Amino acid sequence: MKIALFGYGKMGQMLEKIGLSRGHQIVAKIDAGTSEIAYSDFDVAIDFSTPDAAFKNITDCFKHGVPVISGTTGWLSKIDEAKTICKENKSAFIYASNFSLGVNIFFELNKNLAQMMANLEQYKVSLEEIHHTEKLDAPSGTAITLAEGIIENSLYSGWKLEEEVENHIAITSKRIGKVPGTHTINYESSVDAIEIKHTAHNREGFALGAIIAAEWIQSKEGIFSMKDVLNLT
Ligand SMILES: NC(=O)C1=CN([C@@H]2O[C@H](COP(=O)(O)OP(=O)(O)OC[C@H]3O[C@@H](n4cnc5c(N)ncnc54)[C@H](OP(=O)(O)O)[C@@H]3O)[C@@H](O)[C@H]2O)C=CC1
Ligand SMILES: O=C(O)C1=N[C@H](C(=O)O)C[C@H](O)C1
């Protein structure tokens, strides 16, 4: 498979390593300064760039009939528009706030736990995410997906960053050293606490999941998710 990497930072470099190890070719490494892009040279684009760059990178690929795997976070206000452009151009798209197998299982665990806790008013939920100091967005995309998973399965109506608001999940974002990504959900009562936590030890899991998604999307048309790729019911 011929892969174009949009963004060649920490994740782009890890994607190159994992892609090559699985027998793929990296035919383009695109960054802010790239002026000419030969879309017909690649089978799939993988975008791990920046919140400001993602929408244009992704929709330009769709307009050239190139399927896109997107891991960039912090641009979700425009994702519905991107999906429309994907459909108009009969292209294919997977966005995931987190491509690691472990986090995708954690997403399902989070939803199941939220269902079990839904009627237990004595427990108050909160969410904490910790990432490296170079991260541009807060809260993390993964924390937003986790909050949405709780909201779908409980009486909470939204989430707030660093703020306590009635019926909203409070999210705390911490930026420390080189932390690859740690997410904790806490249900606190006056007598006890229940906590679930995912800790990424490095970026390999994110990159492997994105390459597997790129392999999976070949010859497909439409909008898909990591649940489709991993066959999680
Ligand atoms: N979904 C997932 O599983 C994961 C998602 N992420 C997300 O992926 C994104 C990238 O993360 P990370 O690699 O750590 O960040 P980095 O800052 O290390 O890399 C981002 C790269 O994008 C480049 N860039 C800037 N503008 C453009 C442009 N117009 N087109 C293409 N590339 C551009 C930057 O170049 P320059 O430095 O020159 O500006 C930089 O090299 C973030 O949004 C992060 O949250 C990260 C890990 C996992
Ligand atoms: O910026 C990162 O590093 C990460 N970003 C993603 C997010 O915002 O959730 C995924 C992972 O946690 C690493």
Image (cartoon, rainbow, N blue to C red):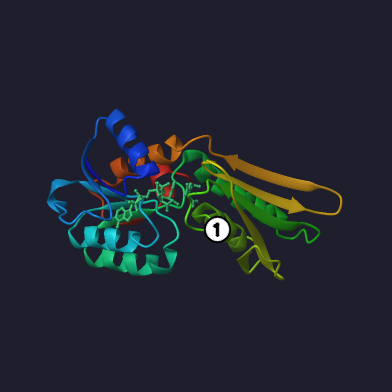
Residue at (52% x, 43% y) in the render: 103
Residue at (29% x, 59% y) in the render: 58
Is 194 placed left or right of 199 in the picture? right
Q: Where in the figure is residue 157, as x and y percent of width and height?
A: 63, 69
What secondary structure is found at the residue carrying circle 1?
loop
Note whether 174 is above or below 155 in the view shown: above
Q: Where in the figure is residue 96, as x and y percent of width and height?
A: 43, 52
Q: Which residue in the protein does label 1 denote?
A: 139
Total marks shown come to 1
Is 187 placed left or right of 211 in the picture? right
Q: Quadrant of residue 214?
A: top left
Q: Quadrant of the N terminus?
A: top left
Nearer to the camera, 98 or 83: 98
The amino acid marked with disc number 1 is Pro
Can see residue 19?
yes
Q: Where in the figure is residue 81, as x and y percent of width and height?
A: 34, 70
Note whether 170 is above or below 104 in the view shown: below
Q: Quadrant of residue 165?
A: bottom right
Nearer to the camera, 231 or 11: 11
Nearer to the camera, 179 or 147: 179
Can see residue 90?
no
Is 45 placed left or right of 137 in the picture? left
Residue at (31% x, 43% y) in the render: 216
Sort mark 1 into few (<14), some (14-19) or many (20+) by Cα contacts within 10 Å. Answer: many
State the residue lying farthest toward the right. Answer: 191
- Mark 1 C-beta closer than 8 Å to ligand 2: yes
Q: Where in the figure is residue 163, as x and y percent of width and height?
A: 67, 66
Residue at (73% x, 52% y) in the render: 187
